[in-house]
Amino acid sequence: MSQTSTERLREYLAQLPPQSQALLMREFERALERGDDVAVARFVLEELRKIVRGSDEDTAPRTEDPARLMFRALEPFLIDTNQQPRPGQIRRGSLTSIWQWLEREAIPASVREFEGGLIGLRGGSAAQVDGLVRKLQIAAAEAIEKVINPEPGVDRQRAMSRVGPPSTVEDLPGVGAVLANREALETFDGKLSSNLRSFGDSQVNSMIGALNVPALQTPIMLPFALTMILQHLTQPWQIVRLAIKVAGSDDEIRVAATPYGVAVTMAIHDLAQLTADLHDELKRGHYTNVAEKLKLIHDGVRGLRTELDLRSDSTWGKRLAAIRVDISNALKSEIESVPGRVRRLLRQRPDKEVSANSRIDQLEVDEAAALIDFVAICRNYASELAINEMTLRTYSELQQYVEKSTEALVQSLRGCDPRVKPFRHQQALAAIRFCEVLFGHDYAQLMRRAVESAMVVVERKPARAG
């Protein structure tokens, strides 16, 4: 564009009302996302931002997206779209479809007013912005309630399908409930301790008192309030203590009969999700967080089995039993593979099979050491996770094999062919690495000194022979 054309465009855009400017900015941002008319969209969007912010030099994109502002109240409850939500959770991916429905069909005038108001409040206070956000949240909650419970004669299924796919429709009631009851959730959040290390009787009673608010006692809102408590617990399974306290019994039938029975469903679901996450990490060979997750699963299974009188044929009992089977199967294949991997690294092949270029893959050594440590960790939680006999047998087998192999490698270094010395030395160092995991630092240092002594003997042998 020539300078004259640019000035005319800027003058025209400046004359538009704030709502129209906001709408144009939104549309051009979407055009950029789609890749439509990128050059034109970027140019016009840049000019709009200059006008809105009152500076020809400030061309940075907006930091606060309107949808993000409105849905910020949902952040504590969002999960990845590929996960199955439990009560008190919402798929993050559902928000895009819901926002588009609100903007396109449900409350388009309110959305345009909101976006225009944000532009008009550039540099305004947080309270002013929050006032706009709250107004839109209330309008959105009312629109969601209307589509969920339509007037007589309205095809509910058809109206719901216009919001988005089935997963979004499934999340819609929760979204509407949280937006409608934001103040109650924020007040409740202010009563939560930052870290509930010991969720004893006094804290349980305190939480039950704080939850005694009509807005939080509905079947749809209670799980969201419980989710907020869960995020503060160091032992998430302890959320079931609320249900036991309200029921006045640990009998699962009496617990399930109370509104707080949903806490048990939530705890079991989270344990199942934790088990699935651990399984995925093991398949990828990631062992960094194994100890932490195993402890959470172990403590959760033990806590639920100890504090609740669960029947083996009940829904909760069957789900807990399935978790134990899943974690046992996931751990079993990994545990049983460890001795074979260690043997492949430490087995003393005949000298004729070892060339001057033979090397041990350090990555394999690192993985084997991590797996040995993994077996050691599993020992601590084996009983509750139904892997006791297998874990103890594997660990004992590893101890015996590594101890004997290390001693044999030290002996072989004392009189081995110089051609194979580097490879045997690498094997010995790998064995010492495994010894440190299995027997501790002191034993590993003792074997390290033995290897160093054996290497000196090998180096001096040719001199004595001469």
Image: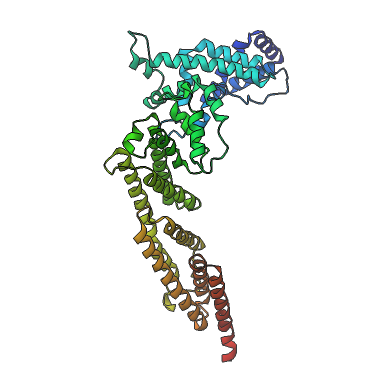
Residue at 42% of width from left, 74% of height from top? 349
Q: Quadrant of the N terminus?
A: top right
Q: Is residue 239 above or below residue 48?
A: below
Front-lying residue, 305 or 77:
305
Residue at 42% of width from left, 59% of height from top? 379
**Residue 34 location, x and y as percent?**
51, 24
Q: Is residue 308 above or below residue 393?
A: above
- Can the viewer see residue 300 in this picture? yes
Residue at 57% of width from left, 18% of height from top? 133
Relative horizontal placement of residue 261, taking residue 434 as reference (left or right):
left
Q: Quadrant of the C terminus?
A: bottom right
Relative horizontal placement of residue 322, taking residue 132 as reference (left or right):
left
Relative horizontal placement of residue 240, taking residue 422 as reference (left or right):
left
Residue at 57% of width from left, 72% of height from top? 445
**Residue 344 location, x and y as percent?**
41, 67
**Residue 20 location, x and y as percent?**
59, 11
**Residue 353 location, x and y as percent?**
42, 75
Total numbered badges shown on the rendered structure: 0
Query: Where, by quadrant of the figure, is residue 144 drawn?
Result: top left
Q: Is residue 257 above or below residue 296?
A: above
Relative horizontal placement of residue 46, taking residue 295 as reference (left or right):
right
